Image (cartoon, rainbow, N blue to C red):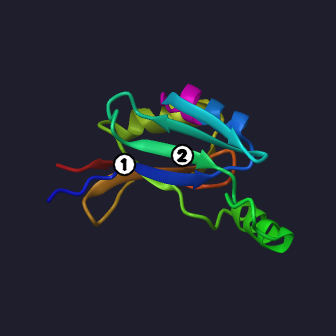
């Protein structure tokens, strides 16, 4: 039996800004763009990983959610308290320079970590923490 990652989800408050970041800055391809009941889901992914998708979804992707729950999720997203993703790169310093030059919000400049990677971190346009790491040799 094998189990592989197929999709992960990132909450975004503005899909157009998220697409500009994930596609234009990170080089992801847009694979799908779907609207349903006033909400929108955009699937992006690395051209190097055609079988792994990142779905950019509304902060609370439930048409039956209460207004109070929607407000709470939007507040958590605005504070950067929802989970993002960690990407692996073969050159974390070059990745940092490219994303920094695009004006992304820097959380951590590249540094060697005691757990065996060199990494950096940014916030995406919705406030999610996005990390980039490179295994150290």
Instruction: Estimate the x, y position of residue 64 in percent, counting from the top left.
Output: 75, 65
Magenta-colored span: 22-28
Instruction: Estimate the x, y position of residue 5 in percent, counting from the top left.
Output: 33, 52
- Numbered label attached to residue 55: 2
State the CA–CA distance, disc 2 to disc 1.
10 Å
Instruction: Determine if residue 110 is in view.
Output: no
Q: Residue at x 27, y 53 (%)?
A: 4
Q: Residue at x 17, y 56 (%)?
A: 2
Instruction: Determine if residue 68 is in view.
Output: yes
Q: Residue at x 85, y 68 (%)?
A: 67
- Numbered label attached to residue 61: none
Q: Nearer the viewer, residue 64 or 75?
A: 64
Instruction: Estimate the x, y position of residue 27 in percent, counting from the top left.
Output: 48, 27
Q: Nearer the viewer, residue 121 or 44?
A: 44
Instruction: Estimate the x, y position of residue 84 in percent, counting from the top left.
Output: 53, 56
In this rendering, position of residue 9 left or right of residue 114: right
Quarter of the view holding residue 21? top right
Quarter of the view holding residue 117? bottom left
- Check residue 26 for magenta coloring: yes
Above or below, 55 relative to 60 = above
Kind of element beneath mark 2: strand
**Labels 2 and 1: the sequence-earlier one:** 1
Q: Nearer the viewer, residue 20 or 131?
A: 20
- Check residue 20 for magenta coloring: no
Looking at the rendering, in which quadrant would you find the N terminus?
Answer: bottom left
In this rendering, position of residue 12 left or right of residue 47: right
- Numbered label attached to residue 6: 1
Kind of element beneath mark 1: loop
In this rendering, position of residue 65 left or right of residue 52: right
Quarter of the view holding residue 33? top right
């Amino acid at each position: 039996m094998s189990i592989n990652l197929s999709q992960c989800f990132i909450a975004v408050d503005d899909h157009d800004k998220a697409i500009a970041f994930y596609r234009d800055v990170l080089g992801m391809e847009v694979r799908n763009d779907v609207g349903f009941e006033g909400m929108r889901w955009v699937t992006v992914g690395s051209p190097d990983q055609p079988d792994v998708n990142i779905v950019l979804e509304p902060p609370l992707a439930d048409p039956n959610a209460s207004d109070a729950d929607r407000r709470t999720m939007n507040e958590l997203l605005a504070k950067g308290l929802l989970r993002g993703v960690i990407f692996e790169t073969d050159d974390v310093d070059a990745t940092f320079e490219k994303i920094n030059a695009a004006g992304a919000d820097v959380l951590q400049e590249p540094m060697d970590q005691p757990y065996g990677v060199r990494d950096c971190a940014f916030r995406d346009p919705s406030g999610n923490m996005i990390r980039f790491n490179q295994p150290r040799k």
